[in-house]
Amino acid sequence: MTYRGMTVEEIKIPGDKGTPISAYVARPSGAGPFPGVVLVHHLPGWSEIYCEFTRKFAHNGYLAICANLYERNGQGNPDDVAAKVRAEGGVPDAQVIGDTEGAVQWMRAQSGHSGKVGVFGSCSGGRHAFLYACHKKDVDACLDLWGGRVVMAKEELNAKTPTSPIELTKALCCPLLGIFGNEDRAPSPEQVHQHEAELKKHGKNYEFHRYDGAGHGFFYWNRPAMYRIEQALDGWSKVLVFFGKHLAK
């Protein structure tokens, strides 16, 4: 069922350590109850396409929220803020987990919420979504779109990213959907295979879909060099079926 009517707004929620951060919310019309999706944005930032993704989930019957993980790094043009974040080596994993937990807690406090929450992210957000589902136990499904640096070499670890997410696979708390392009290098097909092997090793409930002719970011219609319409349409159908299976029942 789709919901052509919805309300959208920008709100403030308590993020990591109680710091107020902005969040974009989309609610389907009607009383619900609706399952929830918490979107973890990518390194290009709290940008227009993530607002569109948030509305897309509302259109498909989900209460959706996307928090601004770069709130502390400045305001204004998302591209400028993201460039600053990139130059500073990203944001700390622990801070992103804390901010995402704030969004999950906000979701679970809503009167029109069904009690089910999925976490969704692409690129760095895919990595962070997986990290969250390994650190916390309060989500019911996780979606990782081409999350790079799930597999990290020791020399890549630092104070902001102290652990390679693949090392936490045993603690994954919920079913996982992974969507990847076979022309991507971050993650590379080899890293995706390594991640899958670890999921199998620990008996996790997961499904991976790999797309030929697609590289990194192939859902991003606003980046023509990346966008692959056929693969993106099929990928979105997989996303909605997966969340429908694990959240909408």
Image (spheres, rainbow, N blue to C red):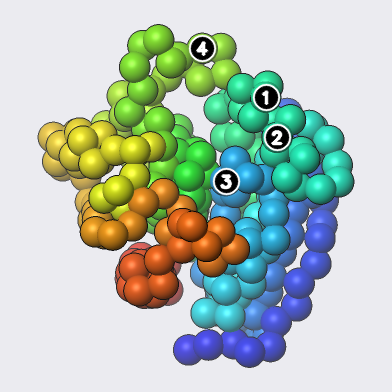
CA distance separating discs 2 and 4: 20 Å
| Spot occupied by residue 49 in the image (x, y as percentages of width and height) | 63, 62
- Residue at 28% across, 59% down: 213
Residue picked out by circle 1? 87
Query: CB under 8 Å between callouts 1 and 4?
Result: no
How far from the left and from the top, in percent, is residue 239?
39, 66
Location of residue 218 with respect to 80 vertically, above or below: below
Let me know if residue 105 appears in the view. no
> Percent x, y for residue 235?
36, 67
Q: Position of residue 148 (x, y in %)?
A: 41, 37
Q: CA distance from mark 3 to mark 1?
A: 15 Å
Residue type at numbered disc 2: Ala
Q: Is residue 12 left or right of residue 105?
A: right
Rounded to the nearest whole Å, what is the CA distance between mark 2 and mark 1?
A: 6 Å
Disc with the residue nearer the chain's start (2 vs 4): 2
Q: Is residue 13 left or right of residue 219?
A: right
Of residues 41 and 15, the one nearer the viewer is 41
Q: Residue at x 44, y 39 (%)?
A: 127
Against 27, residue 174 (above or below) is above
Can you identify the residue that label 4 sits on? 158
Residue carrying label 2: 83
Residue marked by disc 3: 42
Q: Dot 3: within a 10 Å radius of its alpha carbon, few (fewer than 14), some, or many (20 or more) residues? A: many
Alpha-carbon span between mark 2 and mark 3: 12 Å
Quarter location, residue 14: top right
Q: Observer-nearest residue: 37 or 180?
A: 180
